[in-house]
């Protein structure tokens, strides 16, 4: 049992150190990072929708030709 608690403590300490290092070395503020992520997700969503529309159009053309 003591061994498991030791590993849990090490994992928690490592997580805390990782979080602190991440906060201190972040290239932008939280607000700016969220804005960039939202913009990128929007771009990716649009690209995925366009790709899906092209695939559906191609499938429809294929089915009509068959």
Image: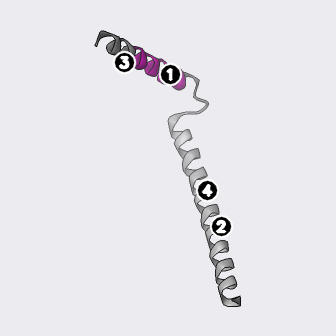
Q: Which mark is residue 18?
A: 1
Q: Which mark is residue 8?
A: 3
Give the residue number, with chain letter if any, for mark 4. 44
Query: Which sits earlier in the primary sequence, circle 4 or circle 2?
Result: 4
Q: CA distance from mark 4 to mark 2?
A: 10 Å
**Can you give x and y, in whole percent of width and height, for residue 33 in the image?**
55, 39
Give the residue number, with chain letter if any, for mark 2. 51
Query: Which sits earlier in the primary sequence, circle 3 or circle 4?
Result: 3
**Can you give x and y, in whole percent of width and height, for residue 6 in the image?**
36, 11
**Could you say which is closer to the camera, residue 40 or residue 4?**
4
**Could you say which is closer to the camera, residue 58 or residue 66?**
66
Quadrant of the snapshot with the C terminus: bottom right
Q: CA distance from mark 3 to mark 4?
A: 38 Å
Q: Is residue 65 above or below residue 2?
A: below
Quadrant of the snapshot with the N terminus: top left
Determine crowd level at label 4: few under 14, some 14-19, many 20+ residues with C-alpha closer than 10 A. few
Which of the 4 quarters of the picture holds residue 63?
A: bottom right
User: Regarding mark 2 in the picture, which secondary structure is present there?
Assistant: helix
- Residue at image position (71%, 89%) is 65
- Residue at image position (65%, 72%) is 55
Which of the 4 quarters of the picture holds residue 64?
A: bottom right
| Magenta segment | 10-23
User: Regarding mark 1 in the picture, which secondary structure is present there?
Assistant: helix
- Residue at image position (62%, 57%) is 43
- Residues at badges 4 and 2 in contact (C-beta under 8 Å)? no
- Residues at badges 1 and 2 in contact (C-beta under 8 Å)? no
**Can you give x and y, in whole percent of width and height, for residue 10 in the image?**
42, 14
Query: Which sits earlier in the primary sequence, circle 1 or circle 3?
Result: 3
Determine crowd level at label 2: few under 14, some 14-19, many 20+ residues with C-alpha closer than 10 A. few
Query: Which sits earlier in the primary sequence, circle 1 or circle 2?
Result: 1
Magenta stretch prevailing secondary structure: helix
């Amino acid at each position: 049992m003591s061994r498991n608690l030791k590993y849990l403590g090490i994992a928690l300490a490592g997580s805390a150190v990782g979080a602190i290092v991440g906060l201190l070395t972040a290239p932008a503020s939280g607000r700016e990072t969220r804005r960039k992520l939202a913009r990128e997700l929007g771009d990716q969503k649009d690209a995925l929708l366009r790709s899906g529309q092209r695939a559906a159009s191609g499938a429809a053309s294929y089915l009509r030709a068959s």
